[in-house]
Amino acid sequence: MTRSTTPTSSSLPAGATARNGVASALDSIGFTRAQFGVLMLILAGEFFDTLEQNSVGAMATNIKATLQIGDLQLTTINTATVLGGLVGRFLAGWLADKYGRRFSLGLNLLVYTLGGLLSALSFNYDMLLVSRFIVGIGVGGEFMIGIAMLSEMVATRYRGGLIATINVGAGGIGNFISYGLFLLLLGPLAVPLGGDHAVWRWTFVILALPALFVVLYRRRLPETPRWLLSKGRIDEANRSLAILASNTLRPPADAKSPVTLTQADLPPIALHSSPAAVFHRSVLRRTIAIGVASWMAFGAQVTLNFLMPTLLVERGYTVSQSLLYTMIMNIGSLLGCTAAALLANRVGRRAMVTTAGILGCLTALAFAAFGNDTGAILLLGALFQFFTMLTNTTLAAWTAEVYPTAIRASGASIVNGIGNIAGAVMPFLAIALYGNFAFAGVFGLAAVMYAILVVASRFAPEARGRSLEDVNENALVSDHT
């Protein structure tokens, strides 16, 4: 197939449209055991990524004492991880669009594991800084590629809920369990693991090694039929559909797709397969809208998850208390992700993000005004985390739905990477505000960010209940014919 740099109606006859056979096939098979296996393999990687992202913030006191560094250097370590994530997102998105979702997803986890082991061996601040940058590269590509992959492999009516389920496991259960795990490792197990100056190193090892098993099992993943079809590989797309329609990721060779794809199912060519196409005028409004929303939503989440244990310690709580309280607050994260998964197939993306964003803004203002004692901190912190994860989970699903297959991974990764930049920048501003205004400054900043998010979300297309082709290829081509 010849690719063009501008939207066209592809090689189909004038006035014709593709049959959308891939959407029909996926809609007809419902949700199979093979698709459940895909979900679990993607979810496993996302879970370890969440543990890794929270690790430095949880072990801040130990790392600062061992390496003789302060809050500014610790925040710089977080920034290195976030900047690595930015590089990882862009690289993984390009690789996923060019060589396939499966290839990119496997590579991400290997890079993450290497970086985690180097973190454990870091003998000074500079080495830890470099190792966290490498971790960021692996973590950065993992999240949105996994979501983009799943979005292309499931029925339209289940897509939003299943994508949200990834964040239930990663952002919800992952955030909650991570602080429980760190509380265990840095508390009762600290002495058996070598004391305060060694336990953080063993923690990095414990987080990295299980990910290797996920890498091995991910070899079972099929490539997505939509990506294969976008490359004109019709026979392979039919084989992928046959796998997804079965009850195992290793079906017999004669397994059949419920719908046989043909040349008529090739999607209209909406955009050239290139990261630069994410900023093409036909999708620029989407990129700006979701990009601004991502900056605000993910910037606030990363800032608060990273700084909360440190802020609590600096307010007089012990390390164990700060980790316990942060874990309790993250019950709200778990409930927020779960609510997003349950509502995704019933409530539109725009309505969900708008409502959760407004309520998140109001909760942040309440925290800024009343978050002075332990009870208020726990209650308002958990409530804010609820609305944070309700917003971010819905936004993550939405991001994977608003770009054509040819640039879906690049688009989702770049837009999510904008939020990644916010995660690198906003903690510095939050620390400065905390120094002058305590919790009121940090949560006041979060309230402003959520207000901007609500406005930005009004300009992205609704995707609930619509096939990916109807939201993207078909709509974009019809706009230019």
Image: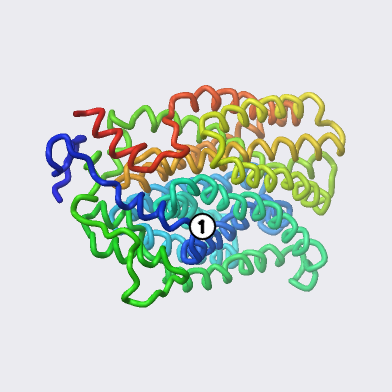
Q: Quadrant of residue 475?
A: top left
Q: Is residue 94 left or right of residue 364?
A: left
Residue at the image position 75 percent from the left and 47 percent from the top:
326
476 lies above or below 393: above
Q: Is residue 13 left or right of residue 345?
A: left
Residue at the image position 55 percent from the left and 39 percent from the top:
394
Return the x and y of residue 151 as percentages of the image width and height.
43, 50
Q: Which residue is mark 1?
A: 135
Residue at the farthest bottom position: 252
Q: SS at mark 1?
A: helix
The foreground one among 63 and 54 is 54
The foreground one among 217 and 449 is 217
Q: Which quadrant is home to the C terminus?
A: top left
Q: How is the image coloured?
A: rainbow
Return the x and y of residue 11 as percentages of the image width and height.
13, 44
Visible residue check, residue 112:
no
The foreground one among 1 and 311 is 1
Q: Residues within 10 Å of mark 1 (few under 14, many from 20)?
A: many
User: Three-letter amino acid code at disc 1?
Assistant: Val
Residue at the image position 59 percent from the left and 23 percent from the top:
451
162 lies above or below 440: below
Return the x and y of residue 329 as percentages of the image width and height.
75, 44
Q: Is residue 29 left or right of residue 237?
A: right
Visible residue check, residue 300:
yes
